[in-house]
Image (cartoon, grey):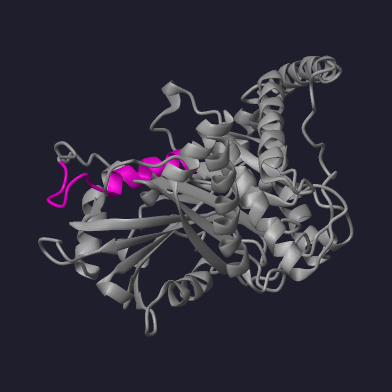
Amino acid sequence: MQRLTGLDATFLYMESPSSVMHVASIMVFDPADAPNGFGFEQLKTLYQSRLHLAPPFRRRLVEVPFGLNHPVWIEDPDFDIDWHLRHIAVPQPGTMKELTELAGHLVAMPLDRTRPLWEAWLIEGLEDGHVAVLSKVHHAAIDGASGEELMVALLDLTAEGDDKGDVVDSWVPDKVPTDTELVGYALASLAQTPVRAVKTVRRTVEAALKIRSNNRQPDVTPPPSPFSAPSTSFNAALTPHRSLGTATLSLTDVKMIKSAFGVKVNDVVLALCSGALRHYFDTKGEHLSSSLVAMVPMSVRTDDQKGDMGNQVSTALATLASDIDDPVERLRIIHQGMNGAKVQQDAIGADTLQNWVEFAAPAVFGSAMRIYARTRMADRHRPLFNVTISNVPGPPFPLYMAGARMVASYPIGPIFDGGGLNMTVMSYLDSLDFGLNACPELIPDIDLIAEGLSVALADLKKAADAAS
């Protein structure tokens, strides 16, 4: 039995009928050279053989009575892999359009909290003989970095398969704890809360004073403050529906732009998203009062925490400089803003956010989030930020699943009331694969944003060529 951290549990409390809090990925494979073919039985055999490398796959939640403390994970005594693997096909002609439409419906479906919080769908019928695997894992169990480690457990470096070491599956199911045991465990954890709270308050006050002093320096541009983002058509209350978009851009071009202007790959990614959103709003004729603000997750996972599941992240607010016409100047402002955000993040401390959410009362937090969604409060105030943008580094070498070569991997992050768009990107080989997740009632034409990414890359590449 293992208690969820406050940050992990937060993703459970944020979930509502209109906001599911799992992360997903659409992995596209070419099974042409798979030694034993690639079908549902091969997929099931693979997952069964790798369960010992993926701890979240056999853990399920148990709620603490009366919401006294955060839920706990137990090794599910009723685990059955057949509840988690699914098989479906897209309609012809099987293009990315049909795939993303189907995947949008599947992503919108909540995970069953009475079982381990994951599922995988084998999707057949794609053009060129390709197949896809849609994976869904609840954000309470993984973040971007731990999700990448799950991918490593499932994928191989060769079509013949990797030597993952001797299969020693020492897994032992837990006994479902009684209410008395859960209450005792919760009270023992709560007894430590006052000491942790005093330390957290002291560190927060020290960080606030340090940030205030730093932001007063003449050469420092503070990052955007919460609720300073402009209102947009997609910063509103959500419906339960989801639409997905994808785009694949050249990583070589992105690195060339990075080198030409002395910035980082992540800065270029933010600039591409900014350009794509400018393209979208210009096409729609929607005028914004100020620059868009992005929420950028930042991994704070240490070397000692590698291999740990759960969330080890903090967040930064970053300007997208979307009110700047010149794409190069926009990129430079984004670069300066991210530098300032990282300085502020260092001052706050890697674990401050995690420490504060430890004190959230589960019963109150969960009820508050459901009331917030039900009353559509997101329609009544300025957004905390406009869009979530996450950049997950991936491998520069080919990967295989059950002998099938991976062609692309599109990550899909969650959205929630007030933040109706998530733009997540993962590098693979010489490409950047973007996965866009939106509420279709707020963004009815998400492909327009996906197309804008290519337009933004072309603008920056032209400027980089001219500068060289």
Residue 255 in percent (x, y) is at 47, 38
State whether residue 61 appears in this view: yes
Is any atom of residue 180 visible in this view? no
Q: Is residue 145 magenta?
A: yes
Q: Position of residue 370 (x, y in %)?
A: 74, 60
Q: Is residue 54 above or below residue 203?
A: below
**Exactly how many numbered labels are in the figure?**
0
Please state if 362 lies on the left or on the right of 183 as rendered: right
Q: Is residue 269 left or right of residue 256?
A: right
Quadrant of the rendered image containing residue 19? bottom right
Give the residue displayed 77% in from the left and 59% down from the top: 235
Left or right: 347 in relation to 380 = left
Please state the horizontal and vertical placement of residue 134, each as a whole percent of the image. 40, 63
Seen from the viewer's position, the closer of residues 306 and 342 is 342
Q: Residue 427 lies in what quarter of the image?
A: top left
Left or right: where does residue 197 sit relative to residue 310? right
Quadrant showing the N terminus: top left
Q: Residue at x 35, y 77 (%)?
A: 88
**Residues drawn in magenta:** 143-162
Q: Which x, y percent locates residue 141?
A: 49, 45
Q: Residue at x 68, y 69 (%)?
A: 443
Relative to 455, say whether 7 is above or below.
above
173 drawn magenta: no
- Residue 121 image-quadrant placement: bottom left
The residue lying toward the viewer, choosing from 196 and 270, is 270
